[in-house]
Image (cartoon, grey):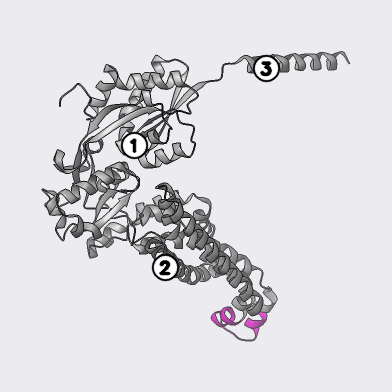
Amino acid sequence: MDTLLFSLKLSLQVATVATVFVVIIGLCTSYLLARRNFPGKELLDILLTLPLVLPPTVTGYYLIVLFGRNGLLGRHLYAWTGWSIMFTWYAAVLASFVVALPLMVKTTRAALESVDEELIRASYTLGHSEFRTAMKVIFPLAKRGIFAGTVLSFARAMGEFGATLMVAGNIPGRTNTMPLAIYSAAASGDRPQAVIMVVIFTLISGIFLYAANKLTRRLI
Amino acid sequence: MIKKMLLSAFLSLFIIAMFCRIASAEPPVDITVSAAISLKNAFEEIGKIYESQNKGIKVMFNFGASGDLMMQIKGGAPVDVFASAALKDMDELDNAGFVLKDTRVNFATNSLVLITPMSSKIALVSFDDLKKAEVKKIAVGNPKTVPVGRYTEETFQYFKVSDMIKEKLVFAENVRQVLDYVARGEVDAGVVYSTDAMVKQQEVRIVVTTPEASHKPVVYPIAVVKSTKNEKAAKAFLSLVTSEEGRKILSKYGFKTAGQSK
């Protein structure tokens, strides 16, 4: 029962935090990709989309190479603070963030690109700054896509397993999100535990999707 | 007109000939061996010898934590031979009737060591030192599915450090992952088999070997799985493992085999 409650709470926590970052960074990045041209633009798009195409274990491996205690970035963090992100719930957030970001960027970029250029130009001719136009015209007109991207990202973050297992590890009481806990229970033959968690996870996901659909219809 | 007839005649003959070849070809025999991952290096070498001695038979290895492998076999995985790092996993299969009882034999033993990254500057000379504040993370096998994790748990209890280091434990899915965590410096210490430490001698330092009294003996049993479709080939693999040749290879990698004192 403890495992169930803890892993559920952790999964929701990790997915929410990851989604917040995904939305913020996702909106900025997709805006740049949709409305600007700069050298390396397509390379950036490919880099951002890679975690969508690569198996989560490959993504996890790259994260270890970058953020492990001896990783390219991780070693400096460790040298300065004596702290490593590996085997902490922050690593689970990082893994979920990396795999969910492409979903947000892809959907948002498409939504932004489909905003009627006439309306944007009208806003500029009326004297609004780019920032104001973005906030008052472009994003609101793209809100369906943005919302869809957010829902997809949250769902992806909740279900993240491969990369999470590699960077956060499967530590009961600390980093075992629900997918990891289910895997543990199944692998050790604890069928009752696994079944309960699977059912609860499915119910929660179902409720979440229902709520998301309802919200879409009402607000958007 | 003639050309068309010749062409279709030729094609039909060709297709018939191909059919005959496929129909009469011998299906390739291969055996699948699920073995504890600590046996990886030794078994891969034994596998090569087996293939050269038994032309036409391929050995497919499936390495992992004994607990995971055991669950796979229970779930009906088409495995011919099973070798685990503990009696518990083999017993579970044996009691459930998944192995051929008369093929079951213990073929090797191992010892447990406490290791630390070669680059680590923490002064570690005993299990007791794991309580030190500088030791922040200790990699151990997941006791639920990994035999080395269970042996480690027993050792920690023997040295009475379990409670104090509980928060520092990082669970790995198999013993080689424990080894990898230590070798990469992701953790400050870990517990693996002495044979695993040998594989990464440059990257890990052995702090101490566990006394025999601190945990159940590390015994490796092997058996032919009942559902095997290649009983003869499977039994031949077992014979090779327990033969003089097999024992020599196992000793080379640090395992102790029956009949040899080391």
Q: Is residue A122 magenta?
A: yes
| Circle nearer the N terminus (1, 3) | 3
Q: Mark 1 points at which residue?
A: B37
Q: Name the residue under label 2.
A: A9
Q: Is residue B233 left or right of residue B107?
A: right
The residue segment tinted magenta is: A121-136
Residue A218 in view (yes/no): yes
In the depicted structure, whether residue A87 falls above or below residue B232: below
Of the residues shown, which amino acid type is indicated by label 1? Ile
Task: Name the element at disc 3.
Answer: helix
Quadrant for the N terminus of chain B in the image = top right
Label 3 resides on the chain identified as: B
Alpha carbons under labels 1 and 3: distance apart: 42 Å
In the depicted structure, whether residue B261 falls above or below residue A113: above
Of the residues shown, which amino acid type is indicated by label 3? Met
Alpha carbons under labels 2 and 1: distance apart: 34 Å
